[in-house]
Amino acid sequence: MAILDIQDLQKIYNTGSEELKILDNLSLQIEEGRSAVITGESGSGKSTLLNLIGGLDRINGGKLYSCGFPIHDLSEKQLTDYRRKSIGLVFQSHYLLKDFTALENVAIPARIAGTDKKTAIERAGELINKVGLGDRREHYPSQMSGGERQRIALARSLVNDPDLILADEPTGNLDEKNSRIVEDILFSLVEDYKKSLLLVTHNLILTERVDLSFHLTCGVLKEK
Ligand SMILES: Nc1ncnc2c1ncn2[C@@H]1O[C@H](COP(=O)(O)OP(=O)(O)OP(=O)(O)O)[C@@H](O)[C@H]1O
Ligand SMILES: [Mg+2]
């Protein structure tokens, strides 16, 4: 099965009188369990594409199937459900809630998705161990380094057992050393939990660690 099947996708932004065509007849297929990297210049539309796949924004034309759902046809309610259960999102910023511990931060999306408290905490604890921060579970984001916070964000992205992880420059705010640590953890999580991955990065070395790599230019994806 294809985890992602995108056909002739169009994304246009209207800014006053001007129409900005950001993605133009873009097609992409990724089989379940595969990992893929997208590179491309700043402003080429990488985040726009990930946001569309993640159901955070709407396409203007074409078809977008993700995790078995026709994303272009879903209602807002169905889209919210898809975002919660099928997709794990990781961004350049960790977006952890400052008044909650690491454990609570990871458990919250599970609680929102309707998981009972005990199960949510258990699963969050397991994932925090997986990212190597078991001893930091009661710490608040302000007590952790940037790299550690991003590892907690990785744990959080998996708490609802999604099929597809979408990661938009997850190491963009980190130094070299911490970038390597976070990348290694991301790849081992994807492998251990058998997830599909779509990763936007500027780190060209990562293209060697994935099944597929694409370059986004002039609104179109080209396989490398
Ligand atoms: N809401 C919006 N309204 C109008 N234009 C937008 C909007 N969001 C993004 N854009 C434009 O779409 C283009 C693609 O932006 P996007 O953020 O997807 O690029 P990117 O490839 O992720 O860049 P970067 O590598 O800097 O993160 C840019 O020209 C941007 O200005
Ligand atoms: Mg971006």
Image (cartoon, grey):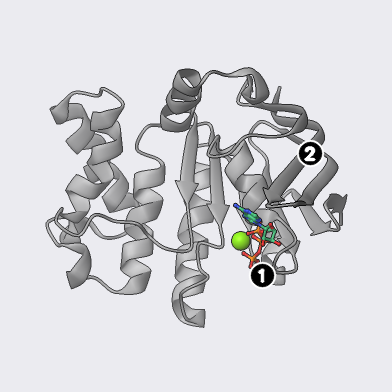
Q: Nearer the viewer, residue 63 or 127?
A: 63
From the viewer's perspective, tell me whether residue 9 is left or right of residue 83.
right
| Helix, strand or loop under label 1 | loop
The quarter of the picture where residue 203 lies is bottom right
Q: Nearer the viewer, residue 79 or 190?
A: 79
**Place of residue 182 in the rendered image (x, y in percent of width and height, measured from the top left):** 46, 65
Label of residue 221 in the image: none
The quarter of the picture where residue 138 lies is bottom left
**Place of residue 142 in the rendered image (x, y in percent of width and height, measured from the top left):** 20, 70
x 60%, y 25%: residue = 67
Query: Which tag, 2 or 1, sits closer to the chain's start?
Result: 2
x 68%, y 55%: residue = 46
* Residue type, mark 1 in image: His
**Place of residue 151 in the rendered image (x, y in percent of width and height, measured from the top left):** 37, 60
Tag 2 near tag 1, CB within 8 Å? no
Q: Specify whether tag 2 is near ligand 1 (CB below 8 Å).
A: no
Disc 2 crowd, CA 10 A, few/some/many (<14, 14-19, 20+): many
* Residue type, mark 2 in image: Gln
Q: Which residue is mark 2?
A: 10
From the viewer's perspective, tell me whether residue 103 is left or right of residue 210.
left
Of the 4 image quadrants, the one containing the C terminus is bottom right
Q: Nearer the viewer, residue 55 or 114?
A: 55
Q: Which residue is mark 1?
A: 202
Disc 1 crowd, CA 10 A, few/some/many (<14, 14-19, 20+): some
Q: CA distance from mark 2 to mark 1?
A: 24 Å
Foreground mark, 2 or 1, reads 2
